[in-house]
Amino acid sequence: YFGFVAPAVLFGLLGAASTLFLQGVSNPKPAMFIQCLMVPTNIIFNWIFIYGRMGAPAMGAAGAALATSLTMALSAFGLAVYISRSRSLKKFQPWGSFRGLWRYGRTIRRFGIPVGAAAALEFLGMTALIMFAGRIGALAISSLEVAFNLHLLAFLVTLGVASATAVRVGNAVGRGDTGDIGLVVLAGISLGLLGMAPFLAGYVVVPESFARAFITDDAVVALTASLLTIIAIALPFDSVQMIVLHSLRALGDQWVASAGQVVSFFFVMVSVGWTLAFPSGYGVRGLVLALLVGAAVAALLMVARLLWVRRRLISAL
């Protein structure tokens, strides 16, 4: 499986760089169009290589990995071709000379290292919660995985809005309109919450229906349904912190923002998760409550930091 999926990392990096470049120049539609094409393409590749259709061998999980790599390669290639052939993008010289690449990359490294380290530790914190669930039992880890997947499903709306908000914040800074930053971030938060509202309503009103989309085991469905109520409370906090976090990065405040991310989702969330799950006896519900606590702490820290940075920028004018 890893042998087939490993190339997807390289293709994913190229695709992500191309997508973020297009977002940065306020031209996100080509990336959206290509990704929409890749969804059915990935489904077809999975059908072919997992089950051995159209003369291909039945590869099972390895076939799913191969399908992922092929899809990501096509996506990255399509974006690269578009960027290379687009006349409107030539002024940005996206595929310019490689001379001085290390020197000019200094700013990117200074910006990217704390961001990448913080994202890795946040992911490690989520992984720790899953590992804790594994210590509780099969029912706990199955329910937690389904709940986390449904959390991610609703959170995808926030990810898109967060990227768009960061671009607009960066544009405001470039124009010198620092007074617009608060309005841009507030608009982003409003759109993020509005976009995930249908998911929140569904998780509260009909949680079993969402759980059964993943699994049919009655015990797992029942436990997952109880977790989704907590997920529905955590999601607005998570949405706010992610949108404000991206805005802070657009303002060049990556170090303090990344530190707040690590404190919230690594130190606070993991320690609270362990305490609630085991000494306090809440089990898997304690792990989801820890996610809620981590997201709430992150939202508080990010908003406080944004207010401070915005005040500093206005005072500097």
Image (cartoon, grey):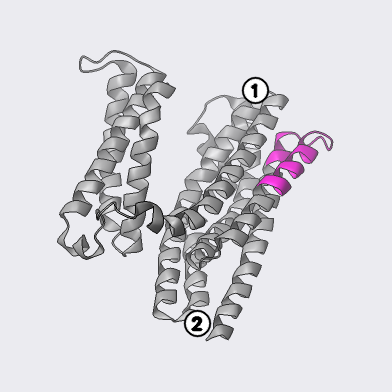
Give me the disc on residue 41: none
The residue at which mark 1 appears reads as 138
Q: Is residue 176 left or right of residue 309?
A: left
**Chain-order first, disc 2 or disc 1:** 1
Q: Is residue 249 magenta?
A: no
Number of residues whose C-alpha sits closer than 10 Å to that of mark 2, classed few (under 14), some (14–19) or many (20 or more): some
Q: Which residues are magenta?
A: 266-287
Regarding mark 1 in the picture, which secondary structure is present there? Answer: helix
Q: Amino acid at mark 2?
A: Gly
Residue 10: x percent and y percent? 36, 37
Residue at screen point 52% across, 61% down: 243
Q: Amino acid at mark 1?
A: Ala
The residue at which mark 2 appears reads as 179
Residue 64: x percent and y percent? 37, 25
Q: Is residue 123 above or below residue 43?
A: below
Q: How many marks?
A: 2
Which image quarter: residue 26? Answer: bottom left
